[in-house]
Amino acid sequence: MSLSRQLGLSLLEVLVTVTIFAMLFAVLTMGWHQSMNAQAKLGDAAEHARTHQQLALVLRQLISEALVPDHQAGTEFNADDKGFVAETTTSLLASIGAAPLPVSVKLETTADGKRLQISHGDAASRPLPWRFSQARWRYLDHAGEWHDAWPPPPAQLGMPLPLERDSYLPALVAFSYTVAGESRGHELLAAPRASSWRLGEPTSPLIGVGAP
C-alpha cells in the first residue's frame, strides 16, 4: 500500500505537467501563426513588386517604340494628362504583328477605379489589368520643362516646326500612379527613342536635270 502511493502522481504534479505542456503548445502555436503571417506579408510584397514590374515593362515598351512618322503619313505623338496617341512597333494584341501601327493608351474612370484602355488602329479597345486610385501623365521637353499635354504650345516649344523631327517626341514620358488598395504613389519614366522604321527623304525629281 505504501509502495503504490510512492509510484503514483500527486494532483499538484499532474497540474504542473499539464501547465508545462499547455505553455509549450501556446508557444508553438504563436510561432506558427507568426510564421504564417510573415509568409502572407512576403507574398503580398512579392505580388505588389510583380504588379509594378509588369506595368513598367508594358508601358516602357510601348513608349520606347513610339515613332515619328515621315511626311505626316502616320500618327504623330499627341498626348494629355489622360494618356497618349502615337505610332509604335509594339503591339499588345496577339492578332497584330510587330509593325508600325497607331496605338492609343488612355485613362478611363470606371466604377472600380481608373484603368488604362489600349487600342491598336481599328481594333476594339481593352482595359489593361491594373486599377488605380490616382493616375496622371506628364511630358518632358528637350529643354527640361514638364508639360501636361504634348505637343506644347509653339511659344513653349520654341518653334512651331522643329527642324529635327525626333524633337516632335518628348524627351521623357512620366506616368504617376497609385495602385488601388495601396497608399504609396509611384512614378514610371520612359524615353521614346529614334525610329528605326523611318525612310529616307525622297529624292527631288529636279536633281540631275540638265546634267550632261
Image (cartoon, grey):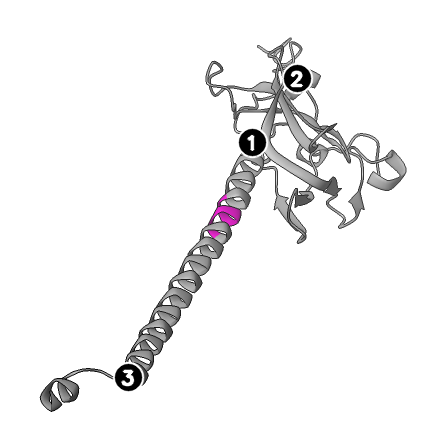
Q: Residue 155: x and y, percent?
A: 89, 38
Q: Quadrant of residue 73?
A: top right
Q: Is residue 55 above or below residue 126?
A: below
Q: CA distance from mark 2 to mark 1?
A: 14 Å
Extent of the magenta region: 46-50
Q: Residue 89: x and y, percent?
A: 53, 24
Name the front one of labels 2 and 3: 3
Q: Secondary structure at mark 1?
A: loop
Say which amino acid is labelled 2.
Gly
Sooner in the amino-acid sequence: mark 2 or mark 1: 1
Cβ–Cβ under 8 Å for marks 2 and 1? no
Sooner in the amino-acid sequence: mark 2 or mark 3: 3
Q: Quadrant of residue 79?
A: top right
Question: Which numbered marker is on residue 65?
Answer: 1
Q: Nearer the viewer, residue 87 or 111?
A: 111
Name the front one of labels 3 and 1: 3
Say which amino acid is labelled 3.
Glu
Q: Residues within 10 Å of mark 2 (few under 14, many from 20)?
A: some
Q: CA distance from mark 3 to mark 1?
A: 78 Å
**The C terminus lies in which quarter of the figure?**
top right
Q: Nearer the viewer, residue 131 or 173?
A: 131
